[in-house]
Image (spheres, rainbow, N blue to C red):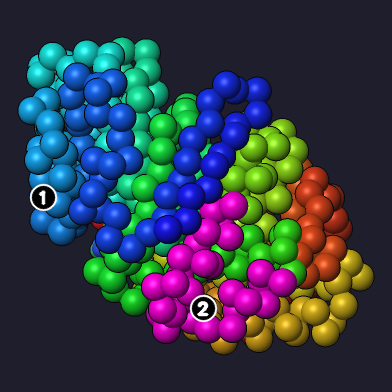
Amino acid sequence: MKDINIVVSHSPQTYSVFIESGLLHSIFDYIEVKKYTAFYVISDSNISDLYVPMVKKSLQEHTEKTVRTYIFEAGEKNKHLQTVEKMWQDMADNKLDRNVLVIALGGGVVTDMAGFVAATYLRGVDYISIPTTLEGMVDASVGGKTGINLGHLKNYIGAFRQPKAVLIDIDTLKTLPDRAFLQGYAEVLKHGLIVDNEYFDEASRKSPLDMSADELIGVISRSVEIKAEIVQEDEKEIGARKLLNFGHTIGHVLESLSMNTDELLFHGEAVSIGMIAEAKISEKLGMIKESEFKKIEDAISQVGLPVRFKGTNSIDSVFDMLITDKKNRGGKIKWTLLTRIGEADFNIEIGEKFVREGIDYILT
Ligand SMILES: NC(=O)c1ccc[n+]([C@@H]2O[C@H](COP(=O)([O-])OP(=O)(O)OC[C@H]3O[C@@H](n4cnc5c(N)ncnc54)[C@H](O)[C@@H]3O)[C@@H](O)[C@H]2O)c1
Ligand SMILES: [Zn+2]
């Protein structure tokens, strides 16, 4: 069992992230049941048969209090206000008061949306996160960013709200298809690249698909620690939290472009290729050595993540979308780039030539 304590700056709140195999059978042990009048489990249609019964059972065996569940149809396309409104309505119809505990059980879509419901229902109630994807475990459930999409604008509406606890049961990863499991590993490697050289070496030795439970717990713990350290320092993304954007500036564009092709990329896959492009830009700027770049590319490719983008061979189409994307958000692109393996810098402005070189590399 790993227990990581997270202290959020400028906030009296601290919470723990528990990482264990088989934890879902005893979630009762991690919840201050006496404090709450009811439990509201929010999950999606893919998780409902897999894990909701187990969580319900664990609670109902120990308390007579109401345990209600709300299941919405799985998928990013449902991460919007209408789904949230239905949950608010359901909670109100069932007379859930301010002492309800919301339990977010699922991937990042569930934890983002359930966290937002908790942040807003009756001006805010407590919640805990139980992430069931690797992306959810090492990224979405740590840091207190909650929210929904507004039309095509991703995560445009939301609130910062920290959970009371994060419960990670690595056994839940077993029911994910391999590709969906692996894609979350891009964020793990990113954490190594931006702050911890040794961890990057260790994490890139094997694919997570081949890891034992102990190895997985070790890797996930360090990743959660890194994200927590960064978020503790800069909850609202004024400074250090921007380090986490490494690979995402170009990654987001590739993710969007892939939607118009036959080879739709998962977020983590797009980030993985984005990290190659942005590491290349770092190399072209003389910030990292060629040998370091080579090591990064070999490592990412060795764990089974993609390193090239097949959706187009036009540098212009990627570049133009990058610029449009940025203009829509108002302003110049500020890059997060590597200064060596295990160290990065943010708010860097660079010339177009370097951006094009980075893009060129991942299209060849
Ligand atoms: N708040 C943050 O800081 C933050 C950080 C990263 C990502 N996110 C958000 O997270 C979302 C992506 O998260 P995700 O990749 O977990 O997506 P997701 O929640 O859509 O899960 C992916 C798919 O896997 C299914 N699933 C989840 N757990 C499963 C399991 N154990 N077994 C079988 N199927 C399972 C889901 O039903 C879904 O179909 C995005 O909306 C993104 O914006 C938020
Ligand atoms: Zn990401």
Is 346 or 167 nearer to us in this picture? 167
Decide if residue 95 is on the left or right side of residue 349.
Answer: left
The residue where tag 2 is placed is 305
Q: How far apart are marks 2 and 1 (CA)?
A: 33 Å
Is 85 or 234 nearer to us in this picture? 234
Identify the residue shown where x is 18% and y is 24%.
Answer: 38
Q: Which quarter of the rendering shows the N terminus?
A: bottom left
Is residue 168 at all visible to an observer of this figure? yes
Decide if residue 324 is on the left or right side of residue 182.
Answer: right
Which element carries disc 1, helix, strand or loop?
helix
Magenta-span inclusion, residue 140: no
Q: Which quadrant of the view contains residue 120?
A: top left
Q: How many marks?
A: 2
Decide if residue 291 is on the left or right side of residue 154.
Answer: right
Magenta stretch: give its range: 198-225
Identify the residue shown where x is 37% and y is 18%.
Answer: 124
User: Mark 2 is on which residue type?
Assistant: Leu
Rendering coords of residue 131 (x, y %) = 35, 51
